[in-house]
Image (spheres, rainbow, N blue to C red):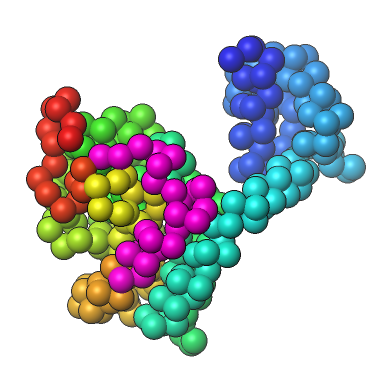
Amino acid sequence: MSGALEKSLAILEYLTAYPDGISLAQISTDLNQLRSGCHRTLQELIGYGYVRQMPQRGDYALTTKMASMGLSFLSKSGVVDIAQPVVQRLALATEELARLAIVDGERLTLVAKAQGARSGLLYDPDMGIDLRLSCSAAGQAWLMTLPEDQAIEYVTRQGMGLPQHYGPNAPTSIKALLKLLEAHRKRGFSIIQDAYAPGMSSMAAPVQRQGERATGVLVLAGPSARLTLERMLQCGPELLAAAAELAVTGHASPLLKSANVGTWGNVAAQPVARGRNRA
């Protein structure tokens, strides 16, 4: 990757965390870029319509151009049209928040949701975020389908994150995470309580056809006071059925088509391959 392109992408990714804008000095410091070069890159990004400069303080922020491109891409892929009815039915049946995350390389990104709770506390995180693999129900549901060495590789590359940013039950070591994944495999879906965030419970099942790699993850989430362990176990059959339906219908969308990500054995249904001998 060229230096100029790398710097441009670094700035674009950095600015996603600052919708109200941030100063040139802070951007260049945090990204370890020379201020003059950082300013030049920002001006080029402004010229292409990806960045704007705030009128009062002169801070820099993203425009909606990238968001528009992303939404257009999702719309044309058909994934939301295919998934939304399934996600909606699951939300209504369980009366909790249902979400779909798709596998994109080593990432899981939320692309669709439906809120089933009719009253009381609502849990509704931002869409479009990349999930932390180690402490989210979706991340653990995906990891449990992978060979153990590959799961470790992905988590190590992304990082476990800082414990203070997540719930008190978030795993803080690879060993603790692997123990959780083993329990999830036996159950067929993941369950977490107060791990991704304090006071939040969630469960997730991989969207995966027999003999193929998972292409997405279907998630239910809600307040821990309502979405208890007993209730999540009761919702398990509904979640698994919806994930199985998406595994079949999702082949109409390139984002949920297993052929695009290769095939492995049905890892979730059998002992995990260890070492480098992947099935």
Residue extending farthest right:
55
Query: What residue appears at the point 58 percent right and 64 percent down from the top-left corner?
Result: 81
Residue 277 in view here: yes
Query: What residue appears at the point 75 percent right and 40 percent down from the top-left corner?
Result: 61
Looking at the picture, tell me which residue is in the foreground, 269 or 164.
269
Q: Residue 242's x, y, as percent?
A: 36, 70
Q: Is residue 84 left or right of residue 156?
A: right
Q: Is residue 11 left or right of residue 105?
A: right
Task: Reply above or below: 145 against 22.
Answer: below
Q: Is residue 230 left or right of residue 5?
A: left
The image quadrant where one finds the C terminus is top left
Residues in magenta, as a range: 241-264
Looking at the picture, tell me which residue is in the foreground, 46 or 112.
112
Task: Reply above or below: 212 against 7.
Answer: below
Q: Residue 108's x, y, as percent?
A: 43, 47
Q: Is residue 97 left or right of residue 1?
A: left
Find out whether residue 145 is within the magenta segment. no
Q: Residue 43's x, y, as percent?
A: 83, 25
Query: What residue appears at the point 52 percent right and 53 percent down from the top-left corner?
Result: 253
Task: Reply above or below: 8 against 119.
Answer: above
Q: Residue 1's x, y, as percent?
A: 59, 15
Looking at the picture, tell me which residue is in the foreground, 208 or 136.
208
Query: What residue appears at the point 29 percent right and 46 percent down from the top-left corner?
Result: 212
Task: Reply above or below: 225 against 192.
Answer: below
Q: Label the magenta part by its dominant secondary structure.
A: helix
